[in-house]
Amino acid sequence: MKGSLLDNKDFLSGLHFLFFGGIGWWMARDYPFGSALRMGPGYFPTVLSVIMLIAGVWFVIKGIRAHDPVGGNWSLRALIVLPISTILFGWLMEESGFVAAMVALCFVSAASGRGFKWLEVTLLTIGLTVTCAAGFIYGLGLPYPMIKGVWGY
Amino acid sequence: MELFNNLIFGFSVALTWQNLWFCFIGCFLGTLIGVLPGIGPLATIAMLLPITFNLPPVAALIMLAGIYYGAQYGGSTTAILVNLPGETSAVVTCIDGYQMARQGRAGPALAIAAVGSFFAGTVCTLIIALFGPPLAELALKFGAPEYFSLMLMGLVAAAVLAQGDMIKSLTMVAMGLLLGIVGTDVNSGMARYSFGIAELTDGIGFIVIAVGVFAIGEIIGNLGQPDESTVFTAEIKGLMPTINDLKISAAPIMRGTLIGAFFGVLPGTGPAIASFSSYMVEKKLAKDPSRFGKGAIEGVAGPESANNADAQCKFIPMLTLGIPASAVMALMLGALTIQGIAPGPQVMTQKPDLFWGLVASMWIGNLMLVILNLPMVGMWVQLLKVPYRLLFPAIMAFSCIGIYSVNNSSMELYLTALFGVIGFFWMKTDCPPAPMLLGFVLGPLMEENLRRALLISRGDPSVFVTRPISLGFVIATVLIIIVMGLPAIRAKRSAITDVAS
């Protein structure tokens, strides 16, 4: 029995090669191609994009002909929540300072796994925030305010 | 003797208090993450790269190298004691090491692993010292065509010799090269693939990709797997191997070292292949092969020496030619670049303290590891009790602060999140990220050398096959592809990599 194409290693990787190769090729059209003697900035990217497009087609066909299923699960929870914790950290570093960024990062990233315990995560957050503040800000002297924005001054 | 003068100079660099301290930190961290199954040397080195920015180059490289070979040591400890390979290279050690532990001979197994690794480390330090300078001298004569062909060979070999689908690996190299193009073109000043984002005109940060793919992507993958709790019961009594143990192990250690050194210089072959080959050789040479799998000490001595030799000899192409042979070496090159040192053969002449200091520190580090690992083995094993749910937020915190500290830019963190997702996708669809990273690191250099080569030859592409050294690299590249494409060899290779992984 053939499985779904969405659960097909080669098909999916082929699609994403097509995607990246496609973007690469499309954007490289705006860069002067030049000649072999004087290569323009478009030469190398175009060649690479075409290689990726060909490989993309190859893997899409390979995937349709033989089904090699993706093992395990997509760990959707972590896949969504963990990147959010990273983004939140970046955003809060600019908006609210180091402490808020660390608290958000610790709580949200901990929530991406199983077995979230409030007390444990709170203690972990305090521990990590203090350690990192001591190490990075006081130790290495990185110039980040602890609190800023609406809550600070 | 120039060799001895150089080594003495190296030790004078490595033995300063600062460098000794960073060597110790590296070995300590390496052992730590080697023991812990959820985190490997790649993620750790990626995570610590931004911090090395604040260190002198020698200290930074000494520390990162310590993490790398320290992880090989730590990985074998858990393989022997709890049948859990902390690192992939220790998979083979599980087979006989764990059996020895079950027979109450955990002590000798650990000791022989340490002795073997130390011996391999010593030999490889000498190999690097012997072969490094002539190689670099040769490479100094290279022009743009030679460099382009050499890089092509390195990338192709890395992709083709690595595990999995050959075409997929090669496409991932192209992916890496393409990602490396993002940013301002040096020749025309044109911003390529910047999507109108100001931060991207400087290119995608090396650290962003490394942390995204190797730390965050990896964590997402780990969180998707069911929890496994390890129960540790084995008791270690008596570390000393018997005289007989040492006698039996001497030859496997030497053979393992040679096998590891050979695979070490080849691009793309991980330490798992070296240790597996050594295991097969020992099994074939043994008078009574049936002992293997039931606690044969040769099955620990050989592979453990091989994986350490492999780890150290991987430094040869990186230090002398500026060509990384594995993803970890690509990270080391990245560390050099962050420090403003252009990797290549000129490193040895312009920064002799870096080269010789690093070489000497590897020997010192191996000595430290023996001391760190053997008497304190009980402490390391206790670490296995730390649950992953406490570990990964800490990894996230260090990674995020590190990335932010490079340019004080939130954009880098958004990109890291994106690469975390992409890295996880690659993991699920068997797209190997290591060739991508090599391509990413070498991409800009390759384009530059290709342009220069064609400019010199007035647009004639035959320049790559008319210059003898370049022709040699091109022939080697073609040979590698043909040989690895042969059905018989492909079948054999997948058999080896299947067992190894």
Image: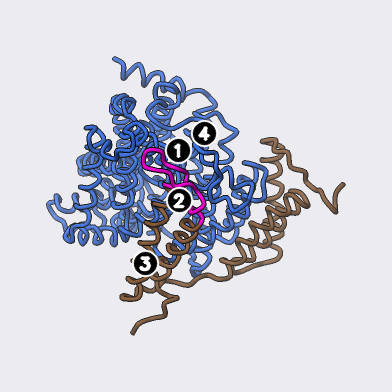
Chain colours: A brown, B blue
Magenta segment boundaries in residue numbering: A27-43
Q: Which residue is mark 1?
A: B333
Could you tell which of marks 4 and 2 lies nearer the N-terminus? Answer: 4
Answer with mark 4 or mark 1, whichever residue precedes in sequence: 4
Q: Nearer the viewer, residue A116 or B378?
A: A116
Q: Check the picture and name the quadrant holding the C terminus of chain B.
A: bottom left
Q: Position of residue A71 (x, y in %)?
A: 41, 71
Q: Quadrant of the N terminus of chain B?
A: top left
The quadrant holding residue B293 is bottom left
> On what subunit does the disc labeled 3 rest?
A
Residue beneath disc 4: B60
Which is more N-terminal, label 2 or label 1? 2
Residue at 47% in and 23% down? B15
3D distance between C-alphas at marks 4 and 3: 43 Å
The percent coordinates of residue B498 (x first, y second) are 29, 62
Give the foreground label among 4 and 3.
3
Separation of residues labelled 4 and 2 (CA atoms): 29 Å
Callout 1–callout 3 Cβ contact below 8 Å = no
Chain under callout 1? B
Same subunit, tags 4 and 1: yes
Residue type beneath disc 4: Ala
Is B134 drawn above or below residue B73 in the view shown?
Answer: above
Spatial CA span between label 4 and label 1: 12 Å
Q: Dot 3, how many residues are within 10 Å of its Cα: few (below 14), some (14-19), or many (20+)?
A: some
Residue B93 % position (x, y): 32, 53
The reply to whether the C-beta atoms of the residues labelled 1 and 2 are less than 8 Å apart is no
Which residue is disc 2 drawn over?
Answer: B178
- Asked if marks 2 and 3 fall on the same chain, the answer is no
